[in-house]
Amino acid sequence: MRSGIIRRSTQAANGIRHAAFAVLLAVGLAPPALAQRADLEKIIRRTVLPNGLEVVAVENQGVPLVTLELVVRNGAFTQTPEYAGLAHLYEHMFFKANDRYPDPDETISRASDMGAVFNASTREELVNYYLTVSADSVTAGMEFLAAAAITPKFLPDELAREREVVIGEYDQQESSPFFRFDQEMGRRLWTTQFSRKNPIGDRDVIRATTPAKMRAIKDLYYIPNNSLLIIAGDVDPAAVFAMAERIFGGWKRGGDPFAAAPIPPIPPLTHNVGYVHEEPVNAVTVQIQWHGPSVRKDEAATFVADVFSDLLNAAGSRFQKRLVDSGLWEGVIVNYYTLNNVGPITVSGQTSPERLRAALKALDAELREVLKPGYFSAEEMDAAKAQRAVSSAFEREKASAFSHTIGFWWSVSGLEYYMKYVDEMARQTPAQLQAYARKYIIDRPHVVGVMLSPEAQARLKLTEDELAQWGAAPTRAVPAVPVKTPVKTPAKTPAKPPAQRPMAPGGLT
């Protein structure tokens, strides 16, 4: 994932949503809480073909266009070190020669004939392929997608070319100091299972891959009972369901890929880790990460996590006033990334070398403040919930974007999770937010990384041991034992110090 691009586009989108929310709230049109599922049930139609392929149709007649998307539960989380980066390489091989279009250039020509706009992406827990066509080309588009999914050829010459394309993407990302910093942070956060969190993979593995490895991925994961087909736009659900059964019905069902190749658990962090990363940069970048909840193991916490992040990120929040408006930080963002195989909680920000230590101290103190009664007001809670409802409504306006949203949630959490997402968000309380912070953030093992210039490091002499001490439970004073004297009055028994809570082990194209 190109995090820099994602952050910029997200900030721009958030600006639009904040403005839209303010207008809607002012005129009393903010979507009512606990009404989102009912709205989604009206526009999302679902069925399952006999071979196990799930099919979703979303009718949106705003424009005569249709997005067809195939989502596969594959991605970085399925990668052993020997396959690191091959989910992404497979993605590059998808729209290549197949039995229906055997010539290497025929696939591209066919897409051009349809006027299709197509692309794909690889993330931690899914790979998706999509094309947008005119409403009168849905049949041709679905046949095009089916041919690529069911009968790929993996021609050696095409694989050799795509290897170099992927390596070129790797080189481009590796040229960024932020990418290098993120990679090192990931290695420390995920330890022995980093390959399952790193879609870009390993350069040597990518260079050495063969058609046989591509076929192994196809046989294990590219099966109908591990896939979702989405048809969104100017369509009739009943008609496209019948079309999907005719075109995809012959796709042979496979065994359970996760019974054949179980996903190992992420090893829990057992202690705090500090990391100092030197790069030729101006500002100091700080990234602090915890292991957050896994959506299928602690679903309730994932809803709380998003409300928690929304509240702390809100302009005008106490958190932002104390840290950013004070001048200690140029910006601070709190984020939980929902995943099934342990989603990370991240607090990231930038400051100056001179303010770094004070900024880190203030951040730790402010995070601890969230545990105090009254930190989150009822007004803030209501505003955050209503804004999330507005944001969700905006996502549904564009069929192609809505299709991607459905695909992500289906793969990571199951579609039922998405159907109730906004309604569940609206039910969260301050007590639940504080319980989440205690369980996953406060005094929990984490990784603290700081990226700064060599010149700044020479002045600060920052150490990894110092960073590892950030966020440690404050030392509590132990009452002194009175000195016994020969007086007859018995000495008072010293008070027992309070018990300390033990620290517990939170897309590429």
Image: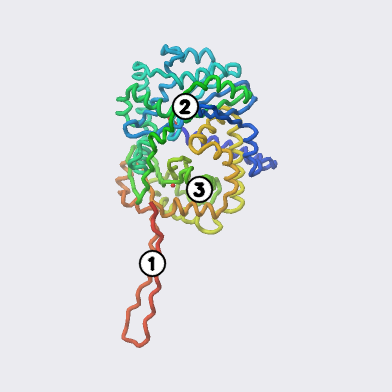
How far apart marks 2 and 3 lie (CA) works out to: 34 Å
The residue at the point 34 percent across, 30 percent down is: 83
Type of amino acid under label 3: Ala
Q: Quadrant of the C terminus?
A: top left
Circle 2 is placed at which residue position? 253
Residue 198 is situated, as x and y percent measured from the top left of the image, at: 38, 35
User: Where's the N terminus, which quadrant?
Assistant: top left
Look at the numbered disc 1 and give the secondary structure of its residue: loop
Mark 1 highlights which residue? 477
Between disc 2 and disc 1, the foreground one is 2
Q: Nearer the viewer, mark 2 or mark 3?
A: 2
For this rendering, which residue is in front, 87 or 494? 87
Q: Earlier in the sequence, mark 2 or mark 1?
A: 2
446 lies above or below 409: below
Give the residue drawn at x 48%, y 25%: 129
Q: Earlier in the sequence, mark 2 or mark 3?
A: 2
CB under 8 Å between discs 3 and 1 = no
- Of the numbered discs in the image, which one, if any, rests on residue 225? none
The answer to which of 417 and 497 lies nearer the viewer is: 417
Q: Position of residue 123 (x, y in %)?
A: 44, 33
Q: Is residue 390 visible?
A: yes
Identify the residue shown where x is 40% and y is 17%.
153
Q: Secondary structure at mark 3?
A: helix
* Label 3 – label 1 distance at C-alpha: 33 Å
